Image: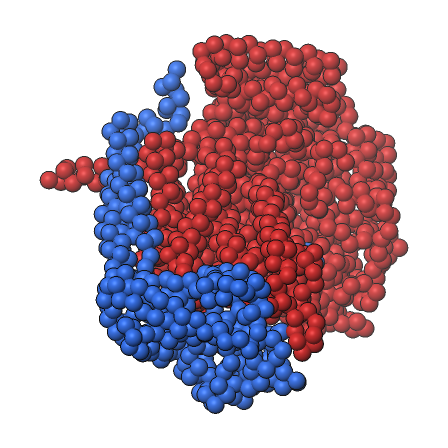
Amino acid sequence: HSCPMVLRIAELTSFGAGASASTHQPNSKFTQQELPACKPILTPKWVISVFLLVGVIFVPIGVASLLASNKVVEIVDRYDDACVPSNVTNKLAYIQNSTISKTCRRTLKVPKDMKQPIFVYYQLNNFYQNHRRYVKSRNDQQLRDASKANETTLCDPEKTRDGMAIVPCGLIAWSTFNDTYTFQHNTNNLSIDKTDISWKSDRDHKFGSDVFPKNFQKGPLIGGKTLNESIPLSEQEDLIVWMRTAALPTFRKLYGRIYVDLKENDTITVTLDNNYNTYSFDGKKSLVLSTSTWLGGKNDFLGLAYLTVGGLCFFLAFAFTLLYLIKPRKLGDNNYLSWNRNSAGH
Amino acid sequence: PGPFRPSRRDQPDPSASERELHEGGEYRAVAVGEPSPEFAGNAVRTAKYSALTFLPRNLFEQFRRLSYVYFLAITVLNQLPQVAVFGRGASVLPLAFVLFVTAVKDAYEDIRRHRSDRRENNRLAAVLAPQTAGEYLPKKWKHIRVGDVVRVASNETLPADMVLLATSDPTGLAHVQTVNLDGETNLKTRYAKQETQLSFSHDGHVAGMLHCERPNRNIYGFQANLEIDGKRVSLGPSNIVLRGCELKNTTWAIGVVVYAGKETKVMLNNSGPPSKRSRLETQLNRETVILSIMLIGMCITASVLAGIWLLNHQRELEFTQFFREKDYTTGKNYNYYGIGMQIFVTFLMAVIVYQVIIPISLYISMELVRLGQAYFMGADNDLYDESSRSRFQCRALNINEDLGQIKYVFSDKTGTLTENKMEFMCASIHGVDYSSGKPACGSSVVVDDLLWTPKMAVRTDPQLLKLLNNDSSNEEAKLVLEFFLALAACNTIVPLVLDTRDPKQKLIDYQGESPDEQALAYAAASYGIVLVERTSGYVVIDVLGDRQRFDILGLHEFDSDRKRMSVIVGCPDKTVKLYVKGADSSMFGIINKSLELDNVRATEAHLHKYSSLGLRTLVVGMRELSQPEFEEWQLAYEKASTAVLGRGNLLRSIAANVECNIHILGASGIEDKLQDGVPEAIESLRQAGMKVWILTGDKQETAISIGYSCKLLTNDMTQIVINNNSKESCKRSLEEALARTKEHRVASSIGSPYPVLASESSGTVLALIVDGNSLVYILETELQEELFKVATECSVVLCCRVAPLQKAGIVALIKNRTDDMTLAIGDGANDVSMIQMADVGVGINGQEGGQAVMASDFSMGQFRFLVPLLLVHGHWNYQRMGYMILYNFYKNATFVLVLFWYVLYTSFTLTTAITEWSSLLYTVLYTSLPTIVVGILDKDLSKSTLLAYPKLYGSGQRNEKYNLNLFVLNMLEALWQSLVVFYIPYFAYRQSTIGMSSLGDLWALASVIVVNMQLAMDIIRWNWIIHVFVWGTIAATVICLFVIDSIWVLPGYGAIYHIMGQGLFWLLLLIIVVTAMVPHFAIKAFSEHFVPSDIQIGREIEKFEALNQVLSVDSYYQ
């Protein structure tokens, strides 16, 4: 087996055979590795300018982000505990008992003026939508294509019901969030717009307009929302929102929008059906009303991070300048070569 | 098999195969003219695969590599449904990619081999048709069989190994060029035996039975005999012509095929190149082990945490929506087997997810980088030898970077430091020194009204010329004549007569394998004793205008034991004379000392004088054989030379018997010129912190004088000479030497706080000179240790009169006791063992043939190329490769850590937010190409700077570009950057509606940009190619992310479009990249400025000196 090896190496390395054949030696800037090149060197001027530049850019961005975040008004109301009657000891049994009415009333106070649109989210804590078992348990072909209704691979353990394929199959669809909210604003009904809460691309391409739910939520264990079998999946926006699985175990999902401006100290009464079971795993449920800015929702982190990094860069620029003034060094000075330094030492 | 035996390689060893023949005792019989099917046919096959076998065999070949098996194991593991992390399609991708690339490469090479095989096999040769009287019909090479008689015309290539039967030359002479075989371009002469030549010229064909040794790899040896007309004729290496050679200057030649196809010597020698592992690659294993431990640690962490989570939530699993233990259609648990099993499965999955931390693709990148580096080394004009038109060649492809870490250079002298173009300078004849050479016009001979002139004229001594021409009756003149006759006859030179432009003039070109002999033959010619013709049976010498024929009755070839050669000549006056020439040590042992003491003494004195001038000396002697003596010798000689087995030994003992009582004629001094630039090159190498040792077979005086002329030795050095004949005296001198080095050390350590080499810090420098005799007692004994201590204290070491194996022994002495890298450079067969022993072996394409080159890792044309090779390319290769390895570790670690942090937020279930396609493409596409291109093209310093400051080479010797500290630093950077890449988006998107795919895209893009920015920050020279690859890769990543998110069947459909539409995404990307890079930038800025490395200073000098020059030129013109 070793025979051809030498041929190969020779072919690869000599690029045109041995001594006799190589009458022509390639000679270009490329082969001599002399292509024109830029060779940047971090001179003190550059170092200090870079640090200063980063600082100068970052601090204003940080301030702007913080301002934007402060402008956001956010109402968070955790209701999972409060919506279980205080005399119930076994919350799991309570929530699983479908015969009990679970309507619950919450009153929210508006801390500051809120400009429309006001986004209504539900927030779950400790719910691992990114759990490996869960995240894979779906079949995207089935969701889009009516002819692939029986395609349920990967949907375990929620594939079939009595031998019939479940549409939409899989744990994600099965566990769709099913608490519902209605709002009253100073005794007037506050209409909530539940359209366009999902991505348009999902409605248009990912969920078929001719795919209807079948055999769904018929099992012994109800995971969540029951779907209307006469509405195609592409219009089941709560499902579509739910099926964009959240990245982190604490997440919000859009429930709807309110197109009314709210005033400071207004009260909002929320009537909610507390159906969704988070009691089995210590999950928390909250209702969130929030305005939005160019930066999205309330989040001070980004602004603080920008300020910190910007400040750090100012500090580094200062430190470098100081050190440079204390211990300046001429660039490209022969005397700093190690062998010259050593001989100067003794 | 002692320590001298080159351990790692299976290289053809000529002496080994010779021994084999003596012991093996089997031979093959070939009937001339009768093709015999029992031996291998002449079809050759270098291709590995056929269309059918390609797939299985190529896969088999590929999976013999450990890294591929690792890939395969991971892929197979991923196919288990319980463990499957990636989808089937995605998981096979990296393995398939690597296999595919390699398979395409192999297929391409194999197609080329197929094509060349087909071309070779279908070439035509004229073959004697059986049962016809001398009719030669064209036959394809592949159909030629052993026993066929083949006729080859001038400039044709020989189809198989053949024994010459007859040639167009009436004396049976043929010339071949063996350039394809061993790289030698000079013509070699081969003979057809007189018996076959005569038989052929009489009846047009030859019949007989040929017995030859079995096929072996020894190009330079062949033993056989031929039974013809009831006579046994012996055949040797000069009677065989080998496949691949070309017939030159001979109209035709006829031979019988003895070895065909894969049994030919050229095919048997077509062995793989030496496989060595570079220092970096060995060190890299240490880091791989560390990374494996990290990998296992991460897997254990993930799986234990997963176990704890399950334990805490055990009772909730059934009703927890995101887990739901049970499958209600079956009523059983789905994919859940209890905590213990779950931990195990998680562990396996973790291995699959995190395996990237061990960068298997690194090995492929390294190969590609080395290939690119090899290309640029080969293309470098500074390594191109104009005179021999030979390029630098990388024969071993895996030790490029070792060239940047060499500490010891072991150099052969003849042909390596010197040109090995010999020039006759002076002669001592019968105790008289003739050394006042004057340029002469040379003498010519008249043959058939044509003027034949030797090609080269030698400076001649007028006194000697006068003596020769005027007075031939004088006793002294007779001796002088004998001296030159010996020079002209006692050799293996073949005079070739070449045409010149003037039709009346011809040139005599002496072709031969030994440059010394050529020089001597030209010298004799210049003094009027012109060798005109040589056949296997006689030589024609024009003695001062009188053409005489001398019969060559026998020839004892030169061998390294006897160190001399002799011929037995039948002179025109019917006397039989023995001419001997050889090294002085071997000659003074066989002379008749009692007779002519004065003569011997004077000659010895002259020899000493010549060798101290740096000349190579040979002693020439003769003896007249009496008739009984001659007959006795002839009987033994004929018997020995027809023996098939043990012929070499027999001939040697006959030679030893007859070479005695020699009468000294004189001695010759031949100048061996230094190659261009050798002293400067040695100076540069020493400046660069390398120790240059010269190992030569020459005499001590010659070696020392060469040492002076190449500036290795200087007058202010203290020489320690070890030249002893017994073990005890060796021991004593070593102890003395050790004491002296200690004195030096003490003296020097007073003044200097550094533990500097004794010889360098004090004013005087030590030089050690050892000779081969002493080495016999030192190497492989307990004295080795002492020698090592002494030698490492000396800055110059010269070893003279060393045998080839001793050369290897000296290299081993250093190699086994230190971690320092050794390089051996040589050009001759005697350097092969040393070249193989050293970490890096360099062969010189010289006069002495191709054996050293064939055994070497790198080959080039001149010694001085060592300077650009080591100082420039070696430095670059080392720095590029070191950086590339560290960078690959770093970039994969960064990515794996980003994946790892996410696992902490998925209840430890190894979900990756980054799509599986992106995770797999990360190593294959997103980050691989820039590092390969940078590994090939980036240069930390320019060629001129590196050559101007040889000490910059020290960075490689001190392992500055790849060491554990740098590795740790890189890992810390990876840790920081992964934290930044992961946690900034984490905190920004906590309690938001962010989806997994969107965040995954951000993480993927951020990691790729950060990792490529790190590379960009470390690139030193930005040329357009590097720009294209670095920015192109980032662009390609974005494109890939878009493409992946445009596939509707994947969960991430549309995610990147969505997230890129938000301002937050861009602000996050900006802060991630800046925050991740701040430490690297700060460390770089602060260290480059306040603790600058030599290379940093060099870069500044390069940049600002050029600037200063431009400025000064500008001001000059203004």
B114 relative to A55 in the view: left or right: right
Q: What is the count of numbered marks?
A: 0
Residue B579, compared with residue B176, is above or below; it is above
Chain letter for the red part: B
The reply to whether residue A325 is visible in this rendering is: yes
Residue A36, compared with residue B522, is above or below; it is below
Residue A166, compared with residue B429, is above or below; it is below
Q: Position of residue B219 (x, y in %)?
A: 70, 49
Residue, far right: B230
B271 relative to B464 in the view: left or right: right
Task: State the residue at coordinates (41%, 50%).
Answer: B980
Residue, far front: A87
Q: Nearer the viewer, residue B833 or B427?
A: B833
Chain letter for the blue part: A
Q: Nearer the viewer, residue B528 or A126?
A: A126
Q: Nearer the viewer, residue A323 or A228?
A: A228
A43 relative to B1032 in the view: left or right: left
Residue, far left: B1118
Residue B314, compared with residue B415, is above or below; it is below
Q: Position of residue B988 (x, y in %)?
A: 37, 56
Q: Quadrant of the N terminus of chain B?
A: top right
Q: Nearer the viewer, residue B198 or B732?
A: B732
The reply to whether residue B527 is visible in this rendering is: no
Task: State the residue at coordinates (45%, 88%).
Answer: A231
Q: Quadrant of the C terminus of chain B?
A: top left
